[in-house]
Image (tube, rainbow, N blue to C red):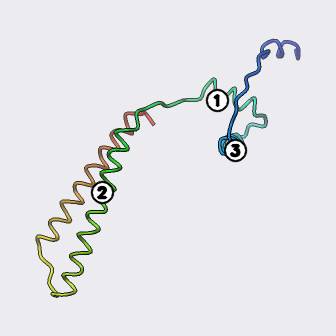
């Protein structure tokens, strides 16, 4: 029986990892409950799912969200300074911030749509 197993697994595969990759491998193996690295890697190869996708659209949307958050924060700061100076707040200021938040929600929706197409 032992000889049959050796015949089935007669090839070795080597991979070089940096220390971060090795730590990730060790953590994932430990979390999986596998005792041997070979068993864990075989299971990953046979049933693991590798996702390959173009992350550029997501990066672009995240960049737009970051810019929008910055812009909205600046506007809120300007409104706060004006309110502190005049003790008045204008409905146009509130409307502008609401519009900016709606734009951000739309961008978040686009990212969710990109992610949903990944099948994750």
Figure disc tally: 3
Q: Point out residue 107 in the picture as x, y percentages from the top left corner.
A: 28, 49
| Residue sitting at x 41%, y 34% | 118
Residue at image mark 1: 44
Q: Point out residue 2 in the picture as x, y percentages from the top left corner.
A: 88, 17
Q: Residue 6 appears in which quarter of the rendering?
A: top right
Which residue is at the front of the view, 22 or 106? 22
Residue 4 higher or lower than 83, as above or below: above
| Residue sitting at x 25%, y 50% | 106
**Quarter of the N terminus within the rendering:** top right
Left or right of 29? Residue 82 is: left
Residue 74 higher or lower than 83, as above or below: above
Q: Label 2 vs label 3: CA separation?
A: 35 Å
- Kind of element beneath mark 1: helix
Residue at image mark 2: 67
Q: Are marks 2 and 1 in contact (CB under 8 Å)?
A: no
Q: Point out residue 61 in the picture as x, y percentages from the top left corner.
A: 32, 46
**Quarter of the C terminus within the rendering:** top left
Q: Are marks 3 and 1 in contact (CB under 8 Å)?
A: no
**Marked residue nearer the N-terminal end (2 or 1):** 1
Residue at image mark 3: 19
- Kind of element beneath mark 2: helix
Q: Residue 84 appears in which quarter of the rendering?
A: bottom left
């Amino acid at each position: 029986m032992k000889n049959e197993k050796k015949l089935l697994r007669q090839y070795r595969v080597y991979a070089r990892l940096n220390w971060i990759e090795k730590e990730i491998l060790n953590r994932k193996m430990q979390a999986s409950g596998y005792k041997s690295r070979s068993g864990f890697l075989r299971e990953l190869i046979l049933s693991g799912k590798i996702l390959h996708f173009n992350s550029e659209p997501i990066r672009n949307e995240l960049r737009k969200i970051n810019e929008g958050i910055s812009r909205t924060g600046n506007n809120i700061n300007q409104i706060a300074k004006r309110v502190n100076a005049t003790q008045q707040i204008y409905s146009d200021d509130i409307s502008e911030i609401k519009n900016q938040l709606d734009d951000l929600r739309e961008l978040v929706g686009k990212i969710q749509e990109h992610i949903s197409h990944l099948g994750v």
